[in-house]
Amino acid sequence: MKYTIKEIKAWILFQISNPQSDRTKVQSWYKYYQSTGGTQWNLTSGDAPCFCRLAKKAGQLINEEYGGNDLIKLMFPGVWIHSHRNAVKWEKV
């Protein structure tokens, strides 16, 4: 595997502090990564499902670290809306 939850978590935390794309645009984690001009992992469309699953878990870890507050929903509303439109259950932790 090209990426780990730990690496994705660090990338999400960096995006919170220094966003490189529009976080309000409705899109998946994979599309958000692509929109940042992401070169860190050289992802292809075949990586999208796994990357999104790991990003969701990384987001849950971040929320857990911040006292169970849904920081990801607050900072990435476009990803949150995308999840709801696609009937993906949103679990903050």
Image (tube, rainbow, N blue to C red):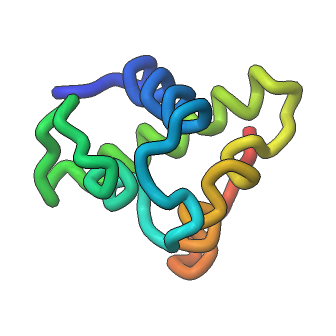
Determine which quarter of the picture holds residue 32. Answer: bottom left
At a point 44% along the width and 68% down the height, the residue shown is: 27
- Whether residue 68 sits left or right of residue 40 in the image: it is right
Is residue 8 left or right of 78 when viewed as pictured? left
Residue 42 horizontal side relative to residue 23, left or right: left
Percent of width and height locating residue 12: 50, 34
Q: Residue shown at 26%/53% (left/top)?
A: 34
Q: Quadrant of the N terminus?
A: top left
User: Against 71, is 5 above or below?
Assistant: above
For residue 86, above or below residue 65: below
Where is residue 36? Give x, y as percent. 32, 48
In the displayed image of the protein, which residue is found farthest to the bottom? 85
Residue 62 in picture, x, y percent from top left: 66, 28
Image coordinates for residue 56, horizontal then vertical, percent: 53, 45
54 or 18, which is in the foreground? 18
Q: Residue at x 53, y 72 (%)?
A: 82
Q: Residue at x 76, y 21 (%)?
A: 65
Tell me the quarter of the picture where residue 41 sits: top left
